[in-house]
Amino acid sequence: MYLIKTPFWLRAIYPQCTWKIPTQEKVIYLSFDDGPHPNATSFVLSELKKYNAKATFFCIGNNVLKHPNVYESILQAGHRVGNHTYDHVNGWKTETNSYIENIKDAASLIDSNLFRPPYGRITKKQIRAIKSNSDLPQHIIMWDVLSGDFDLKIEGTTCARNVIKNAGPGSIIVFHDSEKAWDSMSIALPLVLDHFTKLGFRFECIP
């Protein structure tokens, strides 16, 4: 089970995390988790370029190691990257010291002050450990809207509607540039980019 729109009570439980960017401007913050991936990430970069859109890519360290050229192409296109752990560990199932070491391993490959916990699962103890270590990315980025592109039970058009119905100024949106999400993401992303561009929105990297 997952929530498409992040409710207030969940944001209140983790106030140290960024869920949305306060703004009245027509700006949306697209983000992509679990890459880089040779096909999915390249597709995303191509679609973003069509709309002069910028985004933030939360990368897995192991994938950066496997696909360094794809990782470099993200940076060369003017997008931002973030740390998504070395091998997608679940914070709720990982002891804090091991979790921190996993983030450090990813940080040796990903130069960023942004971190997103895989699955959004992180403990308050882990948050304190991150915040107290200046060698780790200090900004923990969550999201305002999940597209649901990782859910194999729904179609790409449904993922697009999830975003279109729930996103607004300052929303941080989650897509995935991964093999699993490819079928849905490749349909949903162009629809979302087209819809919000026509409404006068712009797409920027998470600041």
Image: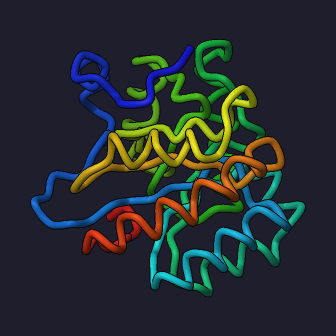
In the rendered image, the residue lying farthest to the right is 66
Task: Name the residue: 57% across, 49% down.
Answer: 175
Left or right? Give the position of 67 relative to 107. Answer: right
**In the figure, 61 relative to 77: above or below?**
above
| 148 or 141: nearer the viewer | 148
Image quadrant where residue 154 sits? top right
Image quadrant where residue 206 sits? bottom left
Task: Name the residue: 66% across, 80% down.
Answer: 46
Task: Name the residue: 67% across, 17% down.
Answer: 94
In the rendered image, the residue lying farthest to the left is 24
Colour mode?
A: rainbow
> Which quadrant does the N terminus fall into?
top right
> Which quadrant does the C terminus fall into?
bottom left
* x and y percentages locating residue 62 in the rendered image: 82, 51
Left or right? Give the position of 127 relative to 111. Answer: left
| 149 or 41: nearer the viewer | 149
Image quadrant where residue 93 sits? top right
Left or right? Give the position of 4 relative to 8. Answer: right
